[in-house]
Amino acid sequence: MESKILYVDPHKCTGCGRCELACSFEHEQQYNSLLSRIRVVYFEDIGLGIPTSCTECEEKACMDVCPSGAIKMTKNDITVIDENICIGCKQCVFVCPFGAISFIKEKKVAIKCDLCDGDPECVKNCPTGAIQYLQLDRAVMKKKRNYLLDLVKKGGI
C-alpha cells in the first residue's frame, strides 16, 4: 500500500486555525494551538497562512538522533513519538529539517504529527478543504497542477 500524506493547498487556506484546535483537542483534550501537532505559519504581509506538519521523511533524522528510542514507526508506517519513553532531550526538535517537532514544556516531551493513526482530525475539521489526506502520487499531481495553474494565471504559459 502506497503511503499517504497531508496535502495542503495554500490557496484554499484561510488561516482560521481550526486544524490546530482540532489537533490539540484530539491529543491533549485542550483547545490550544501551542499543543497542536500541525501549525499554521502566517505570512501577514501577503495575507497567507499555510498549515505545516511532519512530512514523514524517508531518512528519519529524528528517529536516528533519539537516545531513548521514543520515536518509532507504526504498522501504518507513520512515525510517532512515545511520550512514555521520551526523555525530553529535544534532540529531535533540533534535528528536524522542517521544524515539525515541538516540545511541550509542562509535560517535558516532544510532539509531532502522528496523522491521528490514519484519520487526521485536521483534515476532518478544515472548513475549506485546504488540508487533504492523499496517496503520495495523487498529492504530487495536485501540486504540479496548482503550480502550472499559477503560471497560467501569471501569464507564464
Image: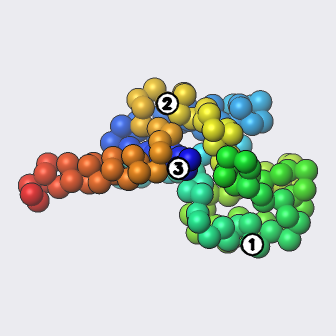
| Residue highlighted by disc 3 | 2
- State which tag comes first along the sequence, 2 or 3: 3
| Residue highlighted by disc 1 | 64
Q: Residue at x 33, y 50 (%)?
A: 141
Which label lies toward us, 2 or 3? 3
Residue at far front of view: 1
Q: Position of residue 9 (x, y in %)?
A: 38, 44
Contact between marks 1 and 2 (CB within 8 A): the answer is no
Circle 2 residues within 10 Å: few <14, some 14–19, many ≥20? many
**In this figure, what is the number of numbered marks?**
3
- State which tag comes first along the sequence, 1 or 2: 1
Q: Position of residue 143 (x, y in %)?
A: 34, 51
Residue 37: in sight, yes or no?
no
Q: Residue at x 85, y 50 (%)?
A: 83
- 77 or 37: nearer the eye? 77
Mark 1 belongs to which amino acid? Answer: Asp
Mark 3 belongs to which amino acid? Answer: Glu
- For label 1, the SS is helix
Q: Position of residue 86 (x, y in %)?
A: 87, 58
| Residue highlighted by disc 2 | 126
Which label lies toward us, 1 or 2? 1
State the scheme by which the image is colored.
rainbow
- For label 3, the SS is loop
Q: CA distance from mark 1 to mark 3?
A: 23 Å
Mark 2 belongs to which amino acid? Answer: Cys
In this rendering, is residue 68 above or below 17? below
Q: Position of residue 119 (x, y in %)?
A: 62, 34
